[in-house]
Image (cartoon, rainbow, N blue to C red):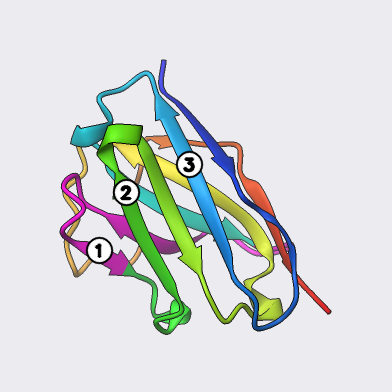
Amino acid sequence: QVQLVESGGGLVQPGGSLRLSCLTSGTIFSINAMGWYRQAPGNQRAFVAAVDESGDNTYYSDSIEGRFTISRDNAKSTVYLHMNSLRPEDTAVYYCAADPNLTLTKTMTAPHFDYWGQGTQVTVSS
């Protein structure tokens, strides 16, 4: 059974940085497209970033405006989300997602993933 476990969330001041991690098991990590979504209170879950199986191609929501970077380490079965210049509006539960059958393209605005983690809370506040 596929399991995704996020970590690295917490409370950070505006302008600060965090690195989220997602450890994946129960699947051959290197064949999965991986992604991050977030859900703020009262909002729907929204796409943040995705990376293809090799790590060579990355995709981002326009809302990120170049502040976040997604990366993966296939040897560690882990995907990361490096978040810089955090704003209060980035406050949300961040979810990791995986899919071995998903082909990412630049026209996708919200890629559909089959497997999800439980989420990690990120709070940006002074």
Check if residue 102 falls in the magenta segment.
no
Locate residue 21 relative to residue 93 in the image: left or right: left
| Residue on which disc 3 sits | 22
Mark-to-mark CA distance, 3 and 2 = 9 Å
| Rendered location of residue 120, percent (x, y) | 64, 47
In the image, farthest residue toward the top: 1
CB under 8 Å between discs 1 and 2: no
Determine whether 58 is above or below 103 in the image. Answer: below
Q: Please tell me whether mark 1 or mark 2 is closer to you in this view.
A: 2
Q: Magenta span covers which residues? A: 40-59
Residue labelled with disc 1: 58
Instruction: Count residues near mark 3 (Cα–Cα under 10 Å), then give few for <14, some for 14-19, many for 20+.
Output: many
Q: Is residue 68 above or below residue 6?
A: below
Amino acid identity at mark 2:
Arg
Is 56 magenta? The answer is: yes
Q: What's the residue at 20%, 69% (across, down)?
A: 107
Which residue does the numbered mark 2 point to in the structure image? 72
Pinpoint residue 47: horizontal percent, then vertical percent: 44, 62
